[in-house]
Image: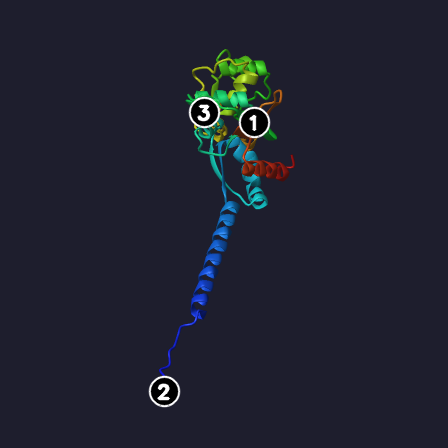
Amino acid sequence: MPSPVHCYPTQKGELSMKHISRLQSSILAAAMTFCLAQAALAQDVKLNGAASVVTDLVAPHQAAVEKATGYTLVVDKSNAGKGLIDLIDGKCDAAMASASLDATVKAAKSAGLTKAVPDLKMHVIAKSEVVFVVHPSNPVKSLTWEQIKDIHTGKIVNWKDVGGKDLPITVYTDAKASATRGLIKQVVMANGEYAASAKAVGFVKEVNDKVAVDASGIGGLGLGFVDPAQVTIVATKKIERPLGFITVGAPSTPMQKVMAAFKTASGN
């Protein structure tokens, strides 16, 4: 009688399963590495603050900066003071500022900043200009800084006192948290106080829009917000200001790359 045949399993199947398992682990690890790399490339950089910086710097060059850096810029347009508060609260990577660091901190305090001010760094990317506009029907075409100061503080209240019509003056100004308003106060008004009658708007572009329909109006704003078809720019001594970003301490690597890209894109 023939001896029974015994079949013993080989280790081939076991080895194949181990090989597949290792292969799957390798694929998973590679996929995770790829996803992390893509996530890094698609990282958001959050910029909060001055509308002037958005209009004059960020918006014109955002696409080029995103392409050059691989980062997505998340932009929250408000004003410099609000942006600085957001930065100190950890809500953004940088605050957009359209005035000096000192003027921006003062604007933030006007907007309700109560926290201790950390080690802030201002990074200037470009320069811009602040101008004053009047209604096209206004015969006043030029003003000295002293006259502008007296108008904004309420010392001069009628256009006839500066060569215009017998018409009460209406001053329009950006929000109290605005760096533009703070810059005008610091540079032109020698830190004098705005007259109680000055009308603050919610957004700087509204200064242009209000003056455009008010023959008695005057207002200071960034040149980029002026519509020359609606208002007339008053000739006066040039008021230059910085456009840039504020960071807490040294900027992060992504922020460094973003700022470098903005300088390149804007030709600065």
Q: Are marks 2 and 3 in contact (CB under 8 Å)?
A: no
Where is residue 100 shown, x and y percent of the image? Answer: 56, 23
For image coordinates 45% across by 19% down, the residue present is 198
Crowd class of label 1 (few under 14; some 14 to 19; many from 20; radius 10 Å):
many
**Which secondary structure, mark 3?**
loop
Left or right of residue 176, residue 127 in this image: right
Q: Nearer the viewer, mark 2 or mark 1?
A: 2
- Label 2 is placed on what type of residue? Pro
Q: Earlier in the sequence, mark 2 or mark 1?
A: 2
Q: Position of residue 193 (x, y in %)?
A: 48, 14
| Within-10-Å neighbours for mark 3: few <14, some 14–19, many 20+ | many
Q: To which residue does mark 3 refer? A: 175
Q: Which mark is residue 2?
A: 2
Disc nearer the start of the sequence (2/3): 2
Q: Is residue 15 visible?
A: yes
Return the disc, 3 or 1, that comes first in the chain's sequence. Answer: 1
Q: Label 2, label 1: how many angstroms apart (C-alpha)?
A: 95 Å
Looking at numbered disc 1 in the image, what kind of residue is underneath it?
Answer: Met
Q: Residue at x 65, y 37 (%)?
A: 267
Colour approach in the figure: rainbow
Q: Is residue 163 above or below residue 27?
A: above
* Tag nearer the camera, 2 or 3: 2
Q: Secondary structure at mark 1?
A: strand
Out of 46 and 265, give the one closest to the viewer.
46
Looking at the picture, which amino acid does disc 3 mark?
A: Ala
Disc 3/disc 1 C-alpha distance (Å): 22 Å
